[in-house]
Amino acid sequence: MPTLLLVLVGYLLGSIPTAYLAGLWLKGIDLRKYGSGTVSGSMVWEHVARWAVVPVGIFDLLKASFPTWLALRLGLGSIAAAAVGLVATVGHNWPLYLGFTGGRGISPFLGTLLVLFPWGCVWLLGFLAIGWLLGDSAPFALAALILLPLFTRWLDGPAVVTPASAAMLLVTLGKRQQANGRKLPPPSPERWRAIVLRLLFDRDITSHKKWIRRRPED
């Protein structure tokens, strides 16, 4: 019962749409209609206010790290703790409060790693930083998740990180393909192109800048 309750708490905490609230309170906009359409820190940076990325990112990290830490504190074990953190990530991606249209899940997964394996958090942040410097973090996030089990084994980290990173990879790919309900083109070569772009780059067009700068009037 404690694990089930924490799973529920994790999902409800993860569902708090921090980036959406920042857009609504600071700019009076619905972030789901801007850029990539995800309720994420990157869209806050692009369309709301760059300083707001800090409190949004911290809260998105904490809403997964807190229930993960609490599971360990209650003696439920690392598997239960990882499950709670991942459910918080699912809540972030498919939030109850926004009709299941949410973010990408990277921040809450960082929060989960911060508790279970802090070096894994550094690993993922390093890949994201490289991607940011090169102008596109999406493929680097995938690479970080794929290679995280090897990095964990190299540092003799907790075994639970391997299935957790595999689960996060599946959640990430599922989110990219589902794309908050954005429709794919009809069956055609263009449809397959969109599928590949979504999986690798988390967008439907080639240009990253055009994608993240889209507005409702475009």
Image: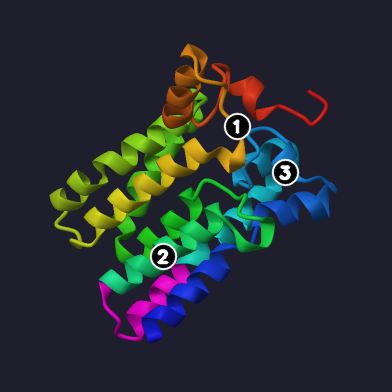
Pick whichever of labels 2 and 1 is earlier in the sequence.
2
**Res 183 label:** 1
Q: Which residue is mark 2?
A: 85
Q: As displayed, is residue 45 above or below residue 73?
A: above
At label 3, the amino acid type is Leu
Pick whichever of labels 1 and 3 is earlier in the sequence.
3
Query: What secondary structure is found at the residue carrying circle 1?
Result: loop
Query: What secondary structure is found at the residue carrying circle 3?
Result: helix
The region drawn magenta spans 65-78
In the visual, does 121 lie left or right of 26? left
In the visual, does 44 lie left or right of 188? right
**The image quarter in which residue 35 lies:** top right
In the visual, does 3 lie left or right of 36? left
Query: What secondary structure is found at the residue carrying circle 2?
Result: helix
Instruction: Give residue 114's position: percent from left, percent from top.
Output: 38, 61
Instruction: Give residue 32's position: percent from left, percent from top.
Output: 70, 42
